[in-house]
Image: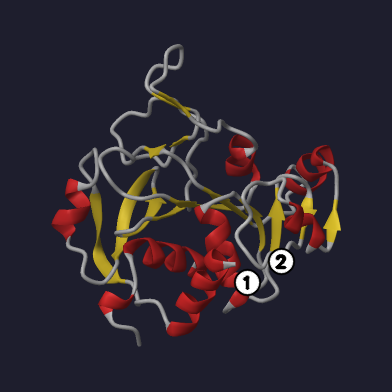
Amino acid sequence: MTNLSDFTPNEMMTIAAARALSNDDVCFVGIGAPSAACNVARLTHAPDITLIYESGTIGSKPYRLPLSIGDGELAETADAVVSVPEMFSYWLQGGRIDVGFLGAAQIDRFGNLNSTVIGPYERPKVRLPGAGGAPEIAALTKRVITIIRQSPRTFVGELDFRTSLGTDGQVVITDLGVLRRIDGELVMTALHAGVTTQQVREATGWELKLADDLETTTPPSEDELAALRELRRA
């Protein structure tokens, strides 16, 4: 067992997200934190997981975190590479993908995501990467996992732009804990070790619901931390 001082909140978030995946999952992976979580799962408890990236790579096994969906390592380590139209029409729309793993800049109480702009759409303060395939991934995969840091800037009462819709069964994993969308609204179901209910309420831009049986997540193991840190060093 690791000591609480041995890992960061970001590492806890990534590893908690990795644990939400199983060995048999076919997972549509976003770049950044989703990619880190999915590859930690592949390197630890889920070696047979199938990771699919939007560029058309199926079964990618990167030894470092890709910089974009066009990173050559994704194709070099993939079991197959297909066209983007085939990826969306045959794999995604055909119901062949179990998990959509998404990041975002903002999330609201219903699990809706914003990855488009901060501020008014016509004159934004920040223009974000945009939707990409996120709306289709959120709508058409069997379950959605979202990874996002929890603060009043990200957990907002109203999105600046609604890029992707939340779905029931959606899991949201943050640097403070785990939420699930239940009956249309996000509910905090677990806190990371050392996090208080006051912290999560102060980090949320709406009146956050807490589960009656609020759990505490298990701290990262040495193997999980080693896998994550090796991906980031490579």
Q: What x and y, as percent, mark residue 48?
A: 70, 74
- Label 1 sits on a secondary structure element that is helix
Measuring from the top left, give residue 76's x and y in whole percent: 81, 60
Could you say whether the residue bearing mark 2 is in a helix, strand or loop? loop
Query: Which of these two is toward me, 216 or 77?
Result: 77
Q: Which residue is mark 1?
A: 42
Q: Residue at x 79, y 45 (%)?
A: 87
Query: Of 64 and 15, which appears nearest the observer?
Result: 64
In the image: residue 71, left or right of residue 177: right
Residue type, label 1: Arg
On the image, numbered disc 2 is attached to which residue?
61
Q: Is residue 11 visible?
A: yes
Sooner in the amino-acid sequence: mark 2 or mark 1? 1
- Given contact means CB atoms under 8 Å apart, are the residues at marks 2 and 1 in contact? yes
In which quadrant is the C terminus drawn?
Answer: bottom right
Q: Residue at x 24, y 38 (%)?
A: 205
Residue drawn 17% across the image and 47% down it:
202
The spot of residue 26 in percent (x, y) is: 69, 61
